[in-house]
Structure formats: C-alpha cells, structure tokens
Image (spheres, helix red, strand yellow):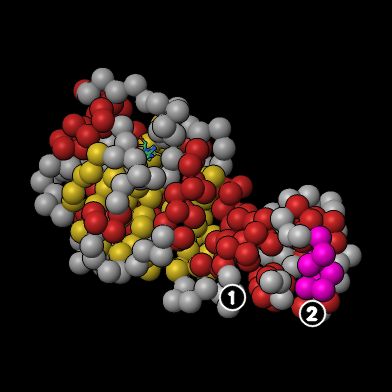
Amino acid sequence: IKPTIAQKDVTKHILKTFNIRMSKKLGQNFLVDEKIVRGIVQAADISPGDTVLEIGPGIGTLTQGLAEAGAQVVAVELDLKLIDVLAETLAGYDNVRIIHGDILKVDIAAEVPAAPFKVVANLPYYITTPIIMGLLEARLPVSVLVTMIQKEVAARMVACPGTKDYGALSVAVQYFTQPRMMFDVPPVSFIPSPAVDSAVIRCLVRDQPAVAVADEKLFFRVVKAAFSQRRKTLNNALKTGIPADQIQPALAAAGIDGARRGETLSLQEFAALANCLK
Ligand code: SAM
C-alpha cells in the first residue's frame, strides 16, 4: 500500500529524501491536506477511464488522488528535479504518464489524444490566466477544468456584471465556460503556506460560446477596450481599441448607452456591440 502523499509528514519526508528546495518562482506550494485532494477529485467527477491532463504534479500529491480514482493521467511538470521524484512516488500506478515540459509550450493535442479529456490542477499561480485562457482558446476537446487558483482570481472568473470583480477575465472565461466556485482552501493546506487564499473553481466548457459573435478577435478587442479604464464611460474607453468614428454608430445600433461603464455590460451586450462594428 502506498502512503498518501497529501499528508504533512509524508510530504516532508519526500522533500527531505530527495533534498528538494521548493521554488517560489515556479509557484511550488504542495498540498498537504487529503480532504482537499478528495474534494478536487470529486469536483472533477472522476470515474475510471476518464483521461485527465494534470498541470504541475509537483511530487505527485493530486496525481495520486486522480490515479486512485481510476483516471488515465497525463501530467506535465516543468521542474526537472521533480521528474525523478515523481518516478518514485508514483511508481506502481500504470495509469500515470509524466511529461517533462512547460505547459505553455507542450503540444497538448499530441500528448493527450483522447477526446474529451478533463483538466485538473493545483496551478502555479504566476501563470494561472495564460494557462486557462491558452487551453480554452486552443479549443482543445476539454470537457471541464477543475483548478485550484488564487481566490481573488477565481472571484473575477465567476463575477457578474456590475460588480467590482467583473472584468475582461470574467467575460473571457464565461464566454467559453460555465464557471462555478467550489470551495475555499486556506494557506495551511500547503507546504509552504502561500501568502494568498486559494479556491477550487470548476469551469464546464460550453459546446458553443455563450454568445454568438461574428468576429471573435473584434469581440475581445471591444471587451479589452471597455475595461481599459474602469472609471471612464464606454464613449471614452472604447477609443483605446476601436476607431473613434465607429463608436457612436455601433453603440446606437446595439441600443447601448455610451454613458454607461464597461463593467455594467453583459456578455450579450458586448456581443451585440462587437457585431455592430465593422
Ligand atoms: N500538484 C502539486 C500539489 O498539488 O501539491 C503541486 C502544485 S504547485 C502549486 C504547482 C506545480 O506546477 C509545481 O510543481 C511547479 O513546479 C509546476 N510548474 C510551474 N510552472 C510550470 C509550467 N510552466 N509548466 C508545468 N508545470 C509548471
């Protein structure tokens, strides 16, 4: 029987045995709370035969939970020192494949040919947004992403129009997925304790984007411009990304008052506005 890695004494023992000094730069905070690992596996609704892409397995803490639940796991870890550790801590699980690489550079479609697959990760916080947006924009056959991220960032992803957390990230995540906050995770659940609170968020990937847009690039340009200066009205903020002479006609055609601020617009309104631009 393999010891559960998600325990303080087991993790400390592994770190000591392999003489691992954890890297802040790589966002290394390892889970030492079995309940949280179980919670993540449950939130991802893992059943035997599911294919899972795990990002940043560390010393194999969450990987073990996923493997025990019967998933076929492909785990991508950037830190070469941890590759040897993983070979040992996960020896005996024939349903785990470890890849040494940078998740932002790996050819995921080639490494995870199954369709659909799930993404489950305790993410390195310094690249949360590029990882999640990269996976969504690549339109890989991902059915769901269950990730532990900084709580503040999770709050922005699920935020509704008109709230302080609502911004370009909320629109982008909600365009591709139905995000839901699952549970909070305190700093004490990790070694070392991060300086921020964490949360597990589940993003169910939509079959079709939430709104129909004629030109996706233009849609995201409008969103970015609308939030570029939060205190400004749309009349002014949109000028940062849209030719000035097109703004008034498009707002009028979409039936949106230019005196409003970007943070009050729903996804539907952003889509209407973008679709009224040339
Ligand atoms: N999954 C482990 C756990 O839950 O205890 C470790 C999570 S730790 C927050 C993040 C992991 O991501 C670290 O192991 C780190 O080395 C790895 N990592 C950092 N940047 C990465 C990248 N660009 N690609 C793949 N892994 C990365």
Spot occupied by residue 211 in the image (x, y as percentages of width and height): 59, 76
Of the 4 image quadrants, the one containing the N terminus is top left
Spot occupied by residue 87 in the image (x, y as percentages of width and height): 16, 37
Q: Quadrant of ligand 1?
A: top left
- Disc 1 target residue: 214
Label 1 element class: loop
Give residue 101's quadrant in the image: top left
Spot occupied by residue 278 in the image (x, y as percentages of width and height): 69, 71
Give residue 98's quadrant in the image: top left
For the point 59% across and 75% down, which residue is it? Answer: 213
In the image, is residue 97 above or below residue 259?
A: above
Give residue 141's quadrant in the image: bottom left
In the image, is residue 267 above or below residue 33?
A: below
Q: Is residue 246 magenta?
A: yes
For the point 78% across and 73% down, which residue is it? Answer: 250
For the point 45% across and 28% down, which residue is it? Answer: 25
In the image, is residue 141 above or below residue 111?
A: below
Three-letter code for the amino acid on which mark 1 is drawn = Ala
- Disc 2 target residue: 253
What span is colored magenta in the figure?
244-251
* Residue 191 appears in view: yes
Q: Is residue 95 magenta?
A: no
Mark 2 vs 1, N-terminal side: 1
